[in-house]
Image (cartoon, helix red, strand yellow):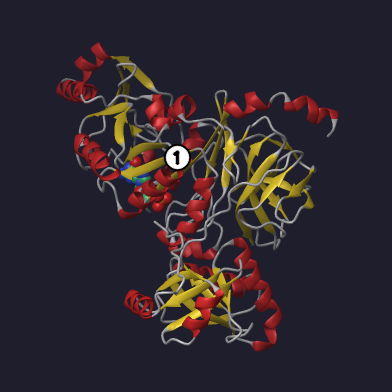
Amino acid sequence: MTLLGAASDKNVPLEARRRRTFAVISHPDAGKSTLTEALLLHARAITTAGATHGKAGRRGTVSDWMAMEQARGISVTSAAIQFEYHDAVINLVDTPGHADFSEDTFRVLSAVDAAVMLVDASKGLEPQTMKLFEVCKQRGLPVITVINKWDRPGATALDLMDEIKDRTGLLPTPLTWPVGIAGDLRGVLDRREDDFVRFVRTSNTTAAPEERVSAAEAAIEQGDAWSVAAEESDLLHAEHQDHDEALFLDGQTTPVLFCAAVLNFGVQQLLDTLVEFAPSAEARLDVVGDPRPVTSSFSGFVFKVQSGMNANHRDHVAFVRVCSGVFHRGMVVTHSTTGRPFATKYAQQLFGRERTVVDQAWPGDIVGLVNASALRVGDSLFDGDPVEFPPMPLFSPEHFRVVRPQDTSKHKQFRRGIDQLDHEGVIQVMRSELRGDQAPVLGAVGPMQFEVVEERMTHDFNAAIRFEELPYQLARRTDRDSAEVLNRARQVEVLTRSDGTLLALFSTPWRLAALVRENPELVLHDLATAV
Ligand code: GDP
């Protein structure tokens, strides 16, 4: 380690404390892209909304880069954006919106310290919102809830609070409370300051500073709307729905804010809330459950691998969450899976299509390592003290297809492409002697993953493919002895996944139940299921 490195190590506690690493999660269309952009605008990271747009026909996101995403208007890939806000350094990690990519979402949520759950005021908790709440709960992630689109008619604020309480089990503790019903956005009552933040209409390309007035002035200015808000806020207080930091960090309560992202309202309060309440980068548990303090030597883990992000360069980027120590570009770290050295010469931060070189990174930061084809999702990297972080779960696939090259002479490209997509965690790849190497079976949690495979194989690997659907619906982990029995049965097939796991695929739950009845000695384990 250089002298410079040794000196900066001293700054680790301070730098880790400044970090707020979070993801925004929501049902599609709740306004995630709009909010992301508004956050950046407020933090002055970009000066004009629209600079990062790309979605066909409507406002786009900073993370759109695949043609397919644009056509579908969904965000499949993830990027991380860093910006400073006051004294804090905010790392916003993007998550795919569609349920078919729940494995990706799960991985991103393993790399952040908090989640912002965005809820559309008129729709309340939607299916994907519920699933994501569940993932956060499993991961013990603190959740800040943001009710968006308050400028449009919707449910009452009290009903929304009841819905959150009843359906997620989290007690909502609003930090702000709307003055005026949904659709009549006047501003919010700041429940901690006991004053009024007025809604000021601005063009959506400027982030206006907040306008605050005292409760007494607000009462005169807003009349009944203010007294209703104040009464409701008292009611919440009587029900103990006030922010409690310990309960929030423990995953029992969720602070709530009301906003209209498209009008840039409430966005500053969200940033302030993140800085004040969201956890900073802290010790992470390793694979055996021991905490790795942020002050240890450098360590991190790969939570996302992506290639073809830049159409001009067929590159391969591994996104690493820094867990401890200082990352210096160019340092040689150890790849814990292989024990081999890994040189980090090309380290970047990715912001949509823009990239900047990262020279240093601290706990909580996300670093994109370019040309990192040796790195797989879940791999750990370290310098000095060895560490291995917990592996990423592979979810139970529910859709299965045989994949073959359209042009058999392209066998090499085909093999390389499938292996690469497997590496990236785009799809699960299974093989059997019976089917041979030219016809692996792909397993997906959601069918849209197959579309990504098709697109990537054609455009990134120049190996167009064809699929053959298989009639299986569920998979179980099995062992060699059981595999022999199962291979003799009908409507079941045993394959080996690339991680070495033997997977038995069944056509229906009834078929599985019948086989278990006939052969009680069979060893069949559930796999992690996508929630
Ligand atoms: P995403 O799919 O969650 O990324 O959602 P988008 O950010 O693309 O937003 C979906 C739609 O909701 C777009 O038409 C936005 O302009 C609109 N939208 C987002 N935030 C607000 C808001 O605060 N108020 C209103 N009225 N519309 C909004």
Q: Secondary structure at mark 1?
A: loop
Q: Is residue 160 left or right of residue 490?
A: left
Q: Which residue is mark 1?
A: 141
Q: Residues within 10 Å of mark 1 (few under 14, many from 20)?
A: many
Q: Is residue 349 left or right of residue 139?
A: right
Question: On the rendered image, what quadrant is the C terminus found in?
Answer: bottom left
Vertical placement of 322 versus 200: above or below? below
Q: Is mark 1 within 8 Å of ligand 1?
A: no
Residue sticking out furthest to the right: 2
Q: Nearer the viewer, residue 501 or 85?
A: 501
Residue sticking out furthest to the front: 521
Residue type pointed to by label 1: Leu
Asked if one can make out residue 227 in the rendered structure from this viewpoint, the answer is: yes
Q: Residue at x 71, y 79 (%)?
A: 412
Q: Residue at x 52, y 60 (%)?
A: 394
Q: Position of residue 121 (x, y in %)?
A: 27, 42
